[in-house]
Amino acid sequence: MKTVIINGQNHKGSSYNIGNILAHKLADDSEITEFFLPRDLNHFCLGCYACMEDLKKCPFYEEKEKIANAMEDGELLIFTSPNYCMMPSAPMKTFIDLFFQYWIPHRPQPAMFKKKAVVISTTAGTGSGKVCADLKRTLSYWGVPYIRKYAIAVQATGWKDVSAKKKEKIEKDMARLAEKVRHATPGKPSPYIRFMFNMMSKAKNNPDDPESEYWKERGWLDGKRPWKNQERR
């Protein structure tokens, strides 16, 4: 299974290691593409809105394109982030900001409506569930229909300090999760996301909207839907 991992930190901590355990239960090394933040996308969104006219107008498009192409080609997306103050890491939040045009109200990418995704977060104590909820919300607004969450308190600040008992539990959890992901079919986005898409198709039927042409070219203003008609960017 072609897998893309987006790691919300450069160091290879607990969240990274769990993501890799899962990935290697589903894919060979040759099928796994991995990115580290901020190493592979070290910019903040400027709020210039250039991407609303054309994704290629983003001043950081060259770096984003590598990640975007990998995500489009992948079957499974794995997002990992440690808990930082009950939220995803700052580099992960920056990544979300830089890909805001993927959200339903802007330029949703048709390929995302066919993906599977897993979001993973660890913490020493509490808060990893909130991180997973934030990441899941983002992917839902991208149109990803199948998303699983895995949040766990590892009671350690680094992977080497996680107890053998805890690592054994994680290994078993990842084996079960891998089986679920392997046999799952993406299906349709949630009713709420489909409702929002339908509402936006009406709002985008406006020649003054800079994203109107994008929606028109894909037939979305005429009733076509990306979860029914797969198209490429």
Image: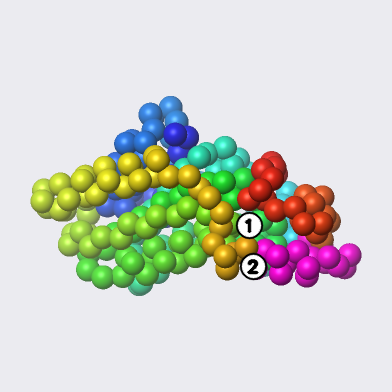
Quadrant that contains the C terminus: top right
Q: How is the image coloured?
A: rainbow
Q: Amino acid at mark 1?
A: Tyr
Residue that mark 2 sits on: 195
Q: Nearer the viewer, mark 2 or mark 1?
A: 2
What residue is shown at x 45% (from left), y 66% (from top)? 134
Drawn side of residue 70 relative to residue 120, left or right: right
Q: Is residue 35 visible?
A: no
Q: Nearer the viewer, residue 108 or 56?
A: 108
Dot 1: element: helix
Q: Nearer the viewer, residue 33 or 183?
A: 183
Compared to residue 121, the image places residue 73 above or below, namely above
Neighbor class of circle 2 (other Cα within 10 Å; few <14, some 14-19, many 20+) is: few
Q: Amino acid at mark 2?
A: Phe
Specify which label sits upstream in the sequence, 2 or 1: 1
Residue 159 place in picture, x, y as percent? 22, 50
Residue 11 place in picture, x, y as percent? 34, 49
What residue is shown at x 31% (from left), y 47% (from top)? 177
Neighbor class of circle 1 (other Cα within 10 Å; few <14, some 14-19, many 20+) is: many
Dot 2: element: helix
- Among the 4 quarters of the image, the one containing residue 151: bottom left
- Among the 4 quarters of the image, the one containing residue 152: bottom left
Q: Is residue 176 visible?
A: yes
What residue is shown at x 52% (from left), y 54% (from top)? 145
Report the span colored magenta. 195-211
- Check whether the beta carbons of the residues at disc 2 and disc 1 lie within 8 A of each other: no
- Among the 4 quarters of the image, the one containing residue 121: bottom left
Residue that mark 1 sits on: 102
